[in-house]
Amino acid sequence: MCYNMFVNMKEEYSRNKKYAEDVFINTKIIRDYLVRHNLSLIEFAKQSDVKFITITHLLNNLLDKVNIVDISKIAKTINCSIMDLIIEFNSKY
């Protein structure tokens, strides 16, 4: 099921939609990484090449839509899969 969600997200992205709606991110993984590596949000933003404000909004669940490219960059930085970061996906899929 997770693989199908990811394929559907990739298909939407390839149709020029850069955002996935109704996606909830497992912020615990990101927060644990920050603590483990003693990183500030600014340092993590630079390391992952994602805007500081985006990471802040992501960690505080303030985003209605999640940029798939940003999630991919965060997953690569943390060394986990995109699906590890996604904890809930409520949409048409």
Image (tube, rainbow, N blue to C red):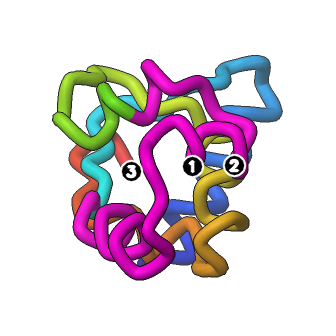
The three-letter code of the residue at mark 1 reads: Phe
Quarter location, residue 14: top right
Q: Secondary structure at mark 2?
A: helix
The three-letter code of the residue at mark 3 reads: Tyr
Disc 1 packing (10 Å; few <14; some 14–19; many ≥20): many
Magenta stretch: includes residue 44? yes
Question: At x 56% / y 66%, what residue is drawn?
Answer: 82
> Above or below — where is 20 with respect to 27?
above
Magenta stretch: includes residue 36? yes
Quick one: 24 or 36, which is closer to the camera? Answer: 36
Magenta-tinted stretch = 27-55
The three-letter code of the residue at mark 2 reads: Ser
Query: Which residue is denoted by mark 1 in the rendering?
Result: 44
Query: Could you say where residue 12 lies in the image, as x and y percent from the top left?
Result: 65, 34
Q: Are marks 2 and 3 in contact (CB under 8 Å)?
A: no
Query: Which residue is denoted by mark 3 in the rendering?
Result: 93
